Image (spheres, rainbow, N blue to C red):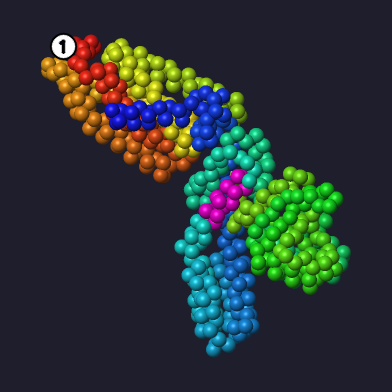
Amino acid sequence: MIKRLIIIGVAMFGVMLAVPTMFPKTAPWFPGFIQPISLGLDLQGGAQLLLEVDTDALVRDAVVQLHDTTRSSLLDRTRGMIRFSDLRRSDYGVTVVIRESADVSRALARLRSEFGASVDVSASGNVITLSYSDRQRAQMIEGALERSIEIVRRRIDALGTRDPAINTQGGRRILVQLPGVDDPERIKELIGQTARMSFHLVNESITHEQMAMGRPPSGTYFLPMIDNPYQLVAVFSRIEVSGESLTDAQSSFDQHGMPVVTQVFDSVGARRFARLTTENVGVRFAIVLDGMVLSAPVIREPIPGGRGQISGNFTVQSANDLAVLLRSGALPAPLSIVEERTVGASLGADTIRAGAIGTVIGVLFLMFAMILIYGKFGMIANIALIVNMMMIVGVSAFMGATLTLPGIAGIALTLAMAVDANVLQFERLREELRTGASALRSIDVGFDRAMKTVIDANLTTLIAALVLFQFGAGPIRGFAVTLSVGIITTLFTCILLSRVMIDMYMGGQNRKIGYVKS
């Protein structure tokens, strides 16, 4: 009796999970963990973007950083300067010529300690070569792809986009699916920006003639203003404070009611920012984002405490977008949009309607066939079939899965497999009745003998679904999820729930089963 109650209770709970999806108006009446299932891009409409990581730029930036770090390490006064005569960049590394042969071994030890296993360091005479091997570049690209996915996810989540799907595709591409998004342009702008911020002092000694010639002296860059690209600002190349030191950024308003972005530095950034503003009162400094100057204010007074404010010609939305970019972090490499697709909500609604009509027609046909062939037991199988369908939807919603068009196909396939399982059980039962066994005996033996075949068929399909989920992406994974959930609910409803309902119908008596023909 307890076993029956548990089985019926589990079935009722699974059906209850599906009610908010089947009847959306009832959703507010259910607790927070019971919510309607989320619809995918092909059903709800929205945008799909295929992004590609610029691996060439990633390697170039890594070589530039390798060059600068090598120079700083060799000129480190605290460990003793090592004199060198030449330091050059190549495609995958740098070479440096040590002046004194006696310093080569010391330079090798220092550089190997500085870079560890991330860079190959070798020497030939007085020439030391630091380079990235194929394996190291592959690891660099893989790490950049993982960081890019995380940063893209943070930027999209900060905008409140519900249920985005972000997955890798190939070795350096990212597939972003945004159901329900009606303004993909803003998403594209946020995703496409590297958001690399740095603080530089302005070179006030540059004349208008030098600026007009467009040839900055060594150690100085001419960078355009972000709101006026024709206006250039001469900034020193030395980074005084890096945007990597930012721990938080929020949009707010200044004392005049204008939108600004407030920023908070970590302990290292706070010390550098305090030193910058203390030692350079009355001097302009530039806030640079992705090679463009956001603003270049004059330092009026020291700013201790690790808090700063970025002002400019911001709107409320642009200030919020910049805060999102800074808060989520800088992309390790630029992202380019390779492909863009937009699915209208009306197309998604048509797809849902067509899928629902097709599923209902198929289920009604199966139910009619089961009643025609198996009579009252066919009715029991139909009840189990309906419970199974609702449990698939309910459990998928409870797991946070997203329903896609292939997912609907997975539900239809699962229902067909459930009917097949019932047919196996009833045909085994029919065989036992034809041998002259009693009804109760036929039910016991028929279900027991069919169980092995049913479990074997469903488990092999479950293994295939798990493989699809592991190695597939996008719609394939959606199909695999609904198919996996459907197989588990099918085993529950066909093996346990159907048997409980048949036992309740029989009531422990050898009732006549009218559909059997001798």
Look at 62% across and 48% down and name the residue there: 155
Kind of residue at badge 1: Ser
SS under mark 1? loop
- State which region is magenta: 144-157
- The part of the image, by quadrant, that contains residue 358 is top left
Q: Residues within 10 Å of mark 1 (few under 14, many from 20)?
A: few
- Identify residue for label 1: 518
- The part of the image, by quadrant, that contains residue 406 is top left
> Looking at the picture, how far across and down is residue 87, in whole percent?
62, 76
- Above or below: residue 411 compared with residue 162: above
Residue 63 horizontal side relative to residue 374, left or right: right
Look at 48% across and 48% down and name the residue there: 170
Please identify the dominant SS of the magenta region.
Answer: helix
Residue 456 visible in the displayed image: yes
> Looking at the picture, how far across and down is residue 158, in whole percent?
63, 46
Q: Quadrant of the N terminus?
A: top left
Residue 370 visible in the displayed image: no
Q: Quadrant of the C terminus?
A: top left
